[in-house]
Image: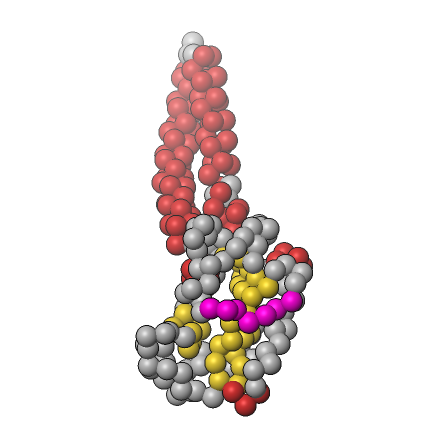
Amino acid sequence: MDDMLRHAHHLLSVVVCAAALVAAPSAAQAAAEGECGSDDVVVVVEPTTLDGDQLVRCATDLAGDATAYDALQAAGLDVEETQGSAPFVCRIDGRPDAAQETCGASLSGDGYWAFLTADEGGEWSYAQTGVRDHDVVPGEFLALRYQLLADGEDVTVETPSTQQTRAEAELVATPGEADDVATSTGYAIGWVEIIVFVLVLGVLVVGAVVLARRRRP
């Protein structure tokens, strides 16, 4: 009988430890709370005259042949392009809206999204190609700044391409990471149900053992 009691206590200890492990954050969630790595690409969006705040995000897990367009996607941006043979970025996260820019065969609004690049600690400069043709390099900084045609071609990115900017860049989970988090969460919920069942069963076992010991002559 004493062996049964010790076994029941051991079972409850295992249940408590398992519950603590399930409550711990998943690896994907923990990674999403880290910092932008030195090989990750920093993406800067400056809407200027358009509504909205400046964004600084980190594009992670890019393939070796990734383009700037891939980095924008990895940074969680909704990018639209003109429909001509040589597409240009015409809208980012819904800005400018359809009344300001039609995103037709060519740009039609009062401004455009200027595309600039920089090395960490370097100066911003116009990219020599569009976002689909620019092959990113590890650690590169990319910027899209909305520039009014009336302001000329002298574009000044306000966000510095510094290590501090990289450290403050927002990490966005890729679709694969989001699926991993969802799967991990679902797995945790399933284990919680099992643990509750085992916990209740353990309590019943302990109660039965205690009751049996009291009735023992």
Residue that protrudes farthest toward the bottom in the picture: 150
Position of residue 215 measured from the top left corner of the image (x, y, whole percent): 41, 15
Q: Residue at x 51, y 76 (%)?
A: 114
Q: Residue at x 32, y 75 (%)?
A: 85
Q: Which residues are magenta?
A: 123-129
Residue 170: name its quadrant. bottom right
- Quadrant of the image for the C terminus? top left
Is residue 158 in view?
Answer: yes
Query: Going by the image, does 47 lie left or right of 103?
Result: right
Indicate whether residue 100 is drawn in magenta.
no
Most foreground residue, 162 or 191? 162
Residue that protrudes farthest toward the top in the picture: 217
Q: Main secondary structure of the magenta part?
A: loop
Residue that protrudes farthest toward the front in the picture: 128
Most foreground residue, 182 or 23? 182
Query: Going by the image, does 144 lie left or right of 69?
Result: right
Query: Going by the image, does 134 lie left or right of 143?
Result: left
Is residue 189 in view?
Answer: no
Residue 199: name its quadrant. top left
Position of residue 168 measured from the top left corner of the image (x, y, whole percent): 62, 59
